[in-house]
Every structure is written in structure tokens, then in C-alpha cells.
Image (cartoon, grey):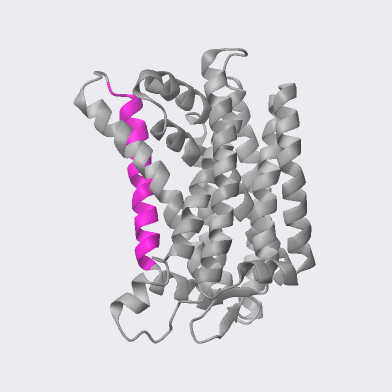
Amino acid sequence: MYEWILFVLIVALLLYVILAGADFGAGILELFTSRKYREEMEGITYQAIGPVWEANHIWLILIIVILFNGFPKTYALISTYLHLPIMLMLIGIVFRGTAFAFRHYDAIRDRSHRVYSSAFTMASFLTPLFLGSIAGATILGRLRTTPTDFLSGYIWPWFNPFSLSLGLMTSALFAFLAATFLIGETEDGSNLQQRVIRQAVMALGATVLLGGVVFLSGELAGFSLAGRFLEHPLSLIGVGLATLGLGLFLAVLRKKRWHLLRIVAGGLASLIVLSWIAAQYPVAIRLADGEHLTLHATRAPDLVMTILGYGLIFGVLSIFPALFFLIKTFKYRS
């Protein structure tokens, strides 16, 4: 059951990055849209994500359930020593959701509407940043199981150049996904579509640039992330395919095949995540003393894994048809 549970965990992570990432990215695009076009962007944002946006958090819930039940030691360490960025991330999700709903149903466009928009866009930007910093903390190896003070135990493991640069890269990646998905929601040849296309290209460039910053900050911190990638053939293959995918994305963009463009963008995001997983596996968390926790070593007893595995079979058979019906009913009919 271990392999099956790990497979579902990875799929849930990929779906959260692609689907929820596109939702977060829509708010980031609004943040970097001038006031002149902000209202038009608000409309296309609600049209694109309004019908199904809350459903995307089911993948985050699934990830938490799998870690809590299947890998309790990993879950305990992350939730204890990274509770601050996790709390800030969850607060961002709540603020973003409430602001999104209040803004859409606001009867009068007054000062409160601007407050809702500011809360939505800032939370959309900061939440992925904290998500990326959490991932960076598990990679860099600054976590201490016996910290000597508050800062070394609960702040510096995630609040450092490497983790924050990974957080910024995550925000840029989400903005890229959102812009790519929004292109097909706009009228062909319209000024709005041209602006969204420019945002997609700029976000892609920012993602690549910040990816380089992540590798550089890792080297400056004494952690060779590039070396980790070079040690694992699957990581190299993933990076190579992602590099080729950049050219494919631009080619499909020129041909204006919007549905295929979404698939290519989702594939690029998946390759980035899978390359990191290949470089990190089987390590779940790197610790400051040179030790590390692996998923296999921190897994729950066999009986728990068996029950969890069968539960995930039932869950997968329930979630995917329900999600498909939700999208078909509310998204495409809208």
C-alpha cells in the first residue's frame, strides 16, 4: 500500500499546484494589472474561477490527511517547526476566499470594494510565497529538532533567501498558469487577450529567472541544489523536458491553440514539481545536523497504511467523478 499512497500523494500535490495554483495566480495577475484595466480583469477572473474555485482546496485537504495518517512523524515535524508559515498560508487562503466572495456580491463599488480587492490580490500573492517557503524549509536543511532559541527553531528554517526565493518562484509559476488558462477565456483578438498573453510570457520569464535565483541562493547557503539534480537522472530528464517545453509553449502560443496551451503549461508545472521530487526522494525533510527523515522510515504501521490505502481507493473513486460533474455543470455551462 505504501507505493499506492505515495502515488496518490504526488498526484494530489500536482493537481493542487496546477488547479489551485491557477486560482492563486489570477489574483496575482490582478495585483500587477493597472487600475485602468483592473475592473475588466476582475470580470474575467470571476468568469474563469468563480464556478469551481473552492473545489481546488480538496487536494490540499487530501495531502494533509495522507501526511497525518500515513506519515505522522513527518507531519508532526512540519506542523510543529513550520507552524508559522503554515498558519500564515491558511490565513491567506481564508482572507482570499472571503474577499473574493464579498467583492463579487458587493452591491456598491465604494471604498469597501477596494479593500476587498486589495485583500484578494495580496493574499493571492503571499499565500503561494509561504507555500514555497515551506517547501524550501524541507529542502535546505535548517530545521532543528532541538532548537536552542525561537529564531533558530521557528523562523530561520523558512525565513531565509533560499526559501523566500522559492516562494517567489512559486508565485510567479502560479501567475504563469493563471495567465495561460485565462487566455482562452478572453475574446480572440481583443486588447484584454493581448494583455493576458503578455502577462503569461512575462510570468514565464519571471519563473525561469527566479528558478536561477533559487539555485544561486542554495549555493550561497552551502546547499548545492544543482548537485542534487545532477545526481538523479530523472531530475535531469525532467529539467531537460521542461526546457524543451518552453519552446513548445511559445510555438503553441503563436498558433493560438488555447486548449493545447493549457495542457503544455500544466505539463511544465508538473515537470518542475516532479524534478524536485525525484531529486529529493526518498528524503522527506532535511535536518540541520546533517540527518534527514525519509518517507519510508516515517510511515505509519502496516495496518494503518492498509486502511489508509483502501480509504484512498474509495476516495479517488468518489472525488474524481464528483469533480468532473462539478466542472461540467458549473464551469462549461457557464
Q: Is residue 38 magenta?
A: no
Residue 157 rendering spot, x and y as whole percentages: 42, 72
In the displayed image of the protein, which residue is found farthest to the left?
A: 111
- So how many labels did they put on this image? 0
Is residue 3 at all visible to an observer of this figure?
A: yes
Front residue of 31 and 244: 244
Please, is residue 5 above or below residue 222 in the view?
above
| Residue 299: quarter of image | bottom right
Residue 115 rendering spot, x and y as whole percentages: 25, 33
Please, is residue 65 above or below residue 24 in the view?
below
Left-right relation of 203 to 43? right
Please, is residue 198 above or below residue 212 in the view?
above
Front residue of 329 and 289: 289
- Residue, x 51% and y 78% (percent of image)? 73
What is the quadrant of the C terminus in the image?
top right
Please, is residue 226 above or below residue 191 in the view?
below
| Residue 282: quarter of image | bottom right
| Residue 298: quarter of image | bottom right
Left-right relation of 184 to 4? left
What is the quadrant of the N terminus in the image?
bottom right
Q: Is residue 93 magenta?
A: yes
Residue 243 rendering spot, x and y as whole percentages: 73, 48
- Residue, x 63% and y 60% (percent of image)? 9
Left-right relation of 189 to 45? right
Give the overall secondary structure of the magenta segment.
Answer: helix
Q: Which residues are magenta?
A: 83-106
Residue 120 rendering spot, x and y as whole percentages: 35, 37
- Residue, x 41% and y 24% (percent of image)? 42
